[in-house]
Amino acid sequence: MDEPTQAELDDIRSSIDNIDAALVHLLAERFKCTKRVGRLKAEHDLPPADPDRESRQIERLREKALEADLDPAFAEKFLNFIISEVIRHHEAIRD
């Protein structure tokens, strides 16, 4: 690979690394909020899962994905993964 191509590749990969780090920090902040929700639900004997909210969130995220030119099916899979982890945390807090 020639030097300019390698430099461009390194630059793009550096951007990807920065985005990955930002995603991790955003997910950590999101889970701090959902843990607060879990504690509130446990205190008030509410169920860990909220299928109506989850459906609304999935639909909202699919719309946001379309606006951002991202595959909405991928966005839905990603959110479903997060939701399952949140529910697991809520169940652990409740127990």
Image (cartoon, rainbow, N blue to C red):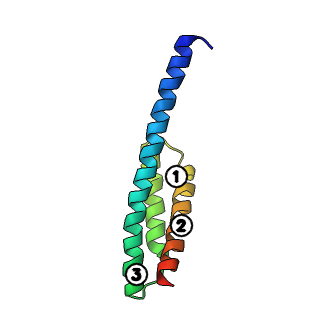
**Residue type for callout 3:** Lys
- Whole-Å distance between the Cαs marked 3 and 2? 16 Å
For residue 3, side relative to residue 40 (left or right): right
**Residue type for callout 1:** Ala
Residue at image position (36%, 80%) is 40
* Residue 49 in view here: no
**Residue type for callout 2:** Glu
Q: Viewer-nearest of labels 3 and 1? A: 3
Return the disc, 3 or 2, that comes first in the chain's sequence: 3
Residue 85 spot, x, y in % from top left: 53, 66
Which residue is the site of mark 2?
85
Label 3: how many Cα within 10 Å (few below 14, some 14–19, many 20+): some
Q: Is residue 73 above or below residue 44?
A: above
Which residue is the site of mark 3?
41
Residue 47 spot, x, y in % from top left: 47, 83
Residue 30 spot, x, y in % from top left: 40, 60
Determine whether the residue tagged by mark 2 lies in a helix, strand or loop.
helix
Residue 75: give its label.
Answer: 1
Residue at image position (42%, 58%) is 28
Return the disc, 3 or 1, that comes first in the chain's sequence: 3
Q: Viewer-nearest of labels 1 and 2? A: 2
Determine whether the residue tagged by mark 1 lies in a helix, strand or loop.
helix
Residue found at the far right of this picture: 1
Residue 56 spot, x, y in % from top left: 44, 66
